[in-house]
Amino acid sequence: MNAEIVLLVVSSIVLVSYLFDMFSHRTRLPSVVLLILSGLLLRLISDWTGFVIPYLGYVLAPLGTIGLILIVLEAGLDLELNLEKTRLINRTFLSSLAGLLLCLFAVGGLYKSLFGAPLRVCLINALPLAVISGAIAISGARQLSAGRLEFVVYESSFSEVLGILLFNFLLGKGTFGPGAFVSFAVEILLTVVVSLFLSLGLTALVERVNHQVKYLPLFALLLLLYAAATLLRYSPLILVLVFGLFLNNITLFIRGNMRKYFDLERIGVEVRQFRSVISETTFVIKTFFFVLLGYSADIPRLLDREALAIVLPVMLLFYASRALPLRLLLPKPPASALTYVAPRGLMTILLFMSIPAGLRIDIIPESVLLWTVLLSSLVMTWGVIKHAGQEDPEPVMARQEVPEPYDDGTPAEE
């Protein structure tokens, strides 16, 4: 194909995605839905013209993995850890963990009854559908009150990280005895400790490197550590999340005499610039991933009755499993509104693509995933429109005034 045509198509996709993002803020329709539909339209045009995008199978998985790393890193850079948010963090963690487990066992039980596969295989295939997409949930919940939006930010971030940890556990452990849980807990603890030391070293690089190009090499180093940890069968996304949390909450980790070796004010400036680079890179990666995902779909199989017969009960199960913990943890108005904010997205697709061939239930149509992403996004849109403008009767989740992230607490000089 002519190079100019490739540039024309690529630049047009980015610009159209940007317009979709602006359009979604007004219509509350997630841009992901529009991107997938654009991919489907591109597939129809491709079938009509006879042109096929080459090497799609080789591009989609790495592109999604990079998108996953970016999303987790962006979530870490958005999360603030302080005593004022302890109640919020506890509630969002419990909500995400309870919702994840309830949905996992409910959908896994459904798969067990439908397909008769072993329980472990059913749970592995059900897990991708139990994880909330932070990227879609956060963008869709911006029309809700500040407290509800903050709840969604923390809850969806916890859901993605817990989902990946549980997925690695199910893949790596053939049995579920006490020894398996103990070894898994020790593995996570060691990974967190190592991640803290690596994050300290990466933070030193952020501060001390004076070259005009520093953020993309830093991200490349993070990708290198991610790939090495994956090959060693550790949980690499813990490193990515810890690094993001470390940067955004630097004053919690660098204390006492350690502050002699770090310029917290300069790190704060660097982190804000790094967050901007990561945010724009995430936007581009997600754009091409979801467009190519829509393009890769087999359009005739989207209307397969077998796929719809699985999608509808699965969606009922994961909304029911979400409503229960929310009703126990929150007052009724925010619980009712947040029940609808449970979209599935990039994490669902990537986890499903990561299932080894020997553990995948081949009877499940792949169009189930695409339908789940589309329908859950539409349900969220309807729920947000229904509850937009509502305020909580009491500030159970409202934002509280906290110090600036890089304020070391010392009084300003007169």
Image (cartoon, rainbow, N blue to C red):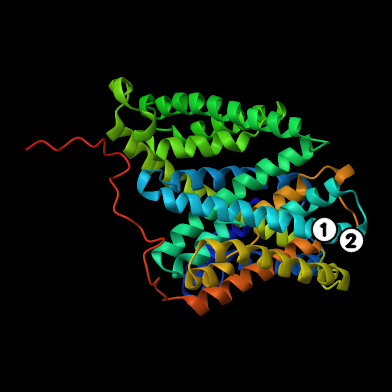
Q: Is residue 88 visible?
A: yes
Q: Position of residue 116 (x, y in %)?
A: 93, 56
* Mark pair 1, 2: CA separation: 6 Å
Q: Which quadrant of the structure image shows residue 132?
A: bottom right
Residue position marked by numbered label 1 in the rendering: 109
Instruction: Specify the quadrant of the image occupied by residue 294.
Output: bottom right
The kind of residue tagged 2 is Ser
Q: Residue at x 51, y 36 (%)?
A: 242
Residue for point 32% across, 39% down: 269
Q: Secondary structure at mark 2?
A: helix
Query: Residue 147's mark?
Result: none
- Residue extending furthest left? 414
Measured from the top left, where is residue 386 in percent x and y?
A: 52, 79
Q: Is residue 16 above or below residue 69?
A: below
Give left or right: position of 92 versus 265: right
Residue drawn 41% across the image and 60% down it: 397
Please state the horizontal and vertical placement of residue 42, each as a whole percent of the image.
71, 66
Which residue position holds label 2? 113
Pick the front one: 187 or 378? 187
**Residue 181 in the figure: left or right of residue 256:** right
| Residue at (52, 42) in percent of width and height | 73
Number of numbered discs: 2
Task: Decide which of 15, 412 is in the foreground and name it.
Answer: 412
Q: Nearer the viewer, residue 222 or 165?
A: 165
Is residue 296 in view? no
* Foreground of the two, 52 or 261: 261
Give the residue at the far right of this rendering. 116
> For numbered disc 1, what is the local secondary structure?
helix
Residue 375's place in the image compared with 66, above or below, is below
Q: Are marks 1 and 2 in contact (CB under 8 Å)?
A: yes
Query: What x and y, as percent, mark residue 157?
Result: 54, 50
* Kind of residue sitting beneath label 1: Gly
